[in-house]
Amino acid sequence: MLRYRSSSDSRPGAERLAGSVRGRPSALLWLSTAVLLAFILTPIIAIFWRGFGDVQIFDRLGDPVVRESLRLSLVTTGITLGVTIIFGTPTAYLLGRHEFRGKAAVSTLIDLPMVLPPAVAGIALLMAFGRRGVLGPALSDYLGIELPFTLAAVVIAQTFVAMPLYVRSARSGFEAIDDEYMQIAATMGLSRPAVFRAVTLPLALPALVSGAVLTWARALGEFGATIMFAGNFAGRTQTMPLAIFESLEGGDPGASLALSAILIIVSFTVLIAFQWLTRSSTARSG
């Protein structure tokens, strides 16, 4: 029969078991990992191989298509990130620090754009804000605002698909804060805004920054919803992913390779930064 053992009695055995389970990996594990890495790295390496060998990527960075799409992407993703932080942080705080009826439904609806196909997201934005959409005529007639196929449409499309990433990450950061810290700050006579600035925000900052990084990267790579709602007009709505598509379709692989290489470098840098922030957050919580 099994008998109960205290945690102090079972800990050495558990450590020995963990040590045996986490021993040297088998050849099968290494082989499977090598195959997966080869599958992922081959297309990426091919871009740089062809770019530096046949096209000379850095020579194409001065092309108007590359320069304008890069500028537009940086501008729109910067605005998207600002809007996301302003509106997403209070929502994440609400979901992370408060309980209320319908919380699960609110959380699910905020996450919904993350799982929507890009075409569906684009159609949804058109049906809501297009000239013949639900809100489009009112915006045009009463406010004189035309959203489709404008710079604002690019920002709206990027925000729609990327904001849930920030809210989810920031919510996790707010949820992880021990209530004891908040209570100690309250006993010192600090108001709620002061507690948020002095205690809550610094403790949740790694999660907020991680969410911001992921949101910016997702906005930078957005394609489907943008091309359907904002169109693909050079110098006005043509972001880097759209320029890659048009350059490849138009028989100019040099520009598409240059832009693709830039996006790969940025994405890799973002992932490294995200992992570093995640490790830093885990070390602090530990």
Image (cartoon, rainbow, N blue to C red):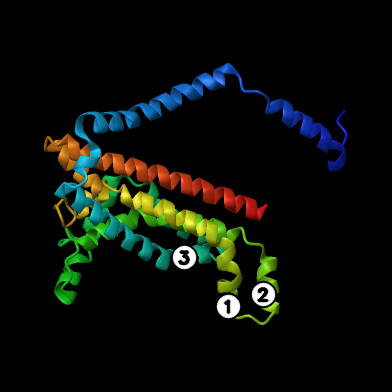
Secondary structure of residue under mark 3: helix
- Answer with mark 3 or mark 2, whichever residue precedes in sequence: 3
- Which dot, 3 or 1, sits closer to the camera? 1
Residue 218 rendering spot, x and y as whole percentages: 36, 49
User: Considering the image in quadrants, where does the N terminus appear?
Assistant: top right
> Hey, what amino acid is under mark 2?
Ala
Residue shown at 43% from the left, 63% from the top? 88
Name the one closer to the observer, 93 or 242: 242
- Image spot of residue 238 (x, y percent): 19, 51
Q: Which residue is mark 1?
A: 194
Whichever of labels 3 and 1 marks the residue nearer the N terminus, that label is 3
Q: Which mark is residue 89?
A: 3
Residue 160 visible, this orientation: yes
Vertical position of residue 249 compared to residue 226: above or below:
above
Give the side of residue 247 with respect to residue 21, left or right.
Answer: left
Amino acid at the residue labelled 3: Thr
Task: Please identify the quarter of the rendering in which residue 188 is found.
Answer: bottom right
What whole-number distance in Å separates the C-alpha atoms at marks 1 and 2?
9 Å
Residues packed near mark 1 inside 10 Å, few (<14), some (14 to 19) or many (20 plus): few
Separation of disc 3 and disc 1 at Cα? 16 Å
The quadrant in which residue 246 appears is top left
Q: Is residue 223 above or below residue 106?
A: above
Check disc 2 and report the residue beneath it. 185
Callout 1 amino acid: Ala
**Marks 1 and 2 in Cβ contact (< 8 Å):** yes
The vertical placement of 41 against 95, above or below, is above
- Residue at image position (82%, 38%) is 11
Contact (Cβ within 8 Å) of mark 3 with mark 2: no
Give me the disc on residue 85. none
| Labelled pair 3, 1 in contact (Cβ < 8 Å) | no
Point out residue 190 in the picture as x, y percentages from the top left corner: 63, 80
With respect to residue 249, does 266 lie above or below?
below
